[in-house]
Amino acid sequence: NQSGISRNREKEETIFVALTEVVFHLGKGGRKRMQERKRKIEHWHVISLYLIVYDAITVNLAYLLALWFRFDCQFTRIPQNYLNAWMQFVPVYTIVCLIIFFSLKLYRSLWRFAGYSELLRVTVATIVTGILHALGIMTFFQPMPTSYYLFGMIIQFCLTIGIRFSYRFILLERSRRE
């Protein structure tokens, strides 16, 4: 039974190493370095994985909230064609956002030192993804109310920057209390 548990741990470890290589682009020699540190998962890797999940949820939630605000905060007043267009665009937009966030290195930053450069990268990411969102949903699905695009970008920016700078704020507060 112990050997079965050991084999399961080895499988999980192999999967984690492969996932980490893909997510963090370890490149040549990266696998060897990763295997040298098999058991030691760095804190920033865990935080980055949480941020990926958080971003995948919030970039889409931002535009759903924009629709909700546009229709007086009453979900039942949102026309079905707008909800259908939003739901069909969610998978595409999620992938586009994550690719852009990766390319702008939003998952490689040390957020405990978040500053102007991170703020600038999140701003650029929000503007680029917002423009692509507007073009994509208008081209392939249907035009949405004008306020949807503007409020969606603003909410996305606030949610994206808020979690990253709140992490720095929490660490600063924790260190101040100690």
Image: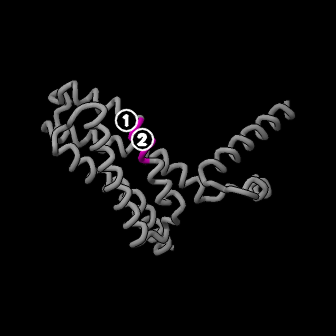
Q: Residue at x 48, y 44 (%)?
A: 53
* Mark 1 lies on residue: 90
How would you classify the magenta stretch by its main secondary structure?
A: helix
Given residues 71 and 117, the one toward you in this image is 117
* Mark 2 lies on residue: 94
Image position, residue 150 (x, y; %) = 21, 50
Q: Mark 1 packing: few (<14 Cα in 10 Å), some, or many (20+)?
A: many
Q: Is residue 157 left or right of residue 4?
A: left
Tell me the kind of residue under disc 2. Answer: Thr
Q: Residue at x 18, y 30 (%)?
A: 78
Which corner quadrant holds the N terminus?
A: top right
Tell me the kind of residue under disc 1. Answer: Val
Q: Quadrant of residue 142?
A: top left
Color scheme of the displayed model: one colour
Q: Quadrant of residue 89?
A: top left
Given residues 5 and 14, the one toward you in this image is 14
- Check the image and report above or below for 103 versus 140: below
Image position, residue 37 (x, y; %) = 76, 57
Q: Quadrant of residue 173?
A: bottom left
| Magenta stretch holds residue 9 | no
Highlighted magenta segment, given as a residue range? 92-97
Q: Tell me the number on the disc at residue 54.
A: none
- Check the image and report above or below for 60 versus 131: above
Image position, residue 160 (x, y; %) = 37, 54
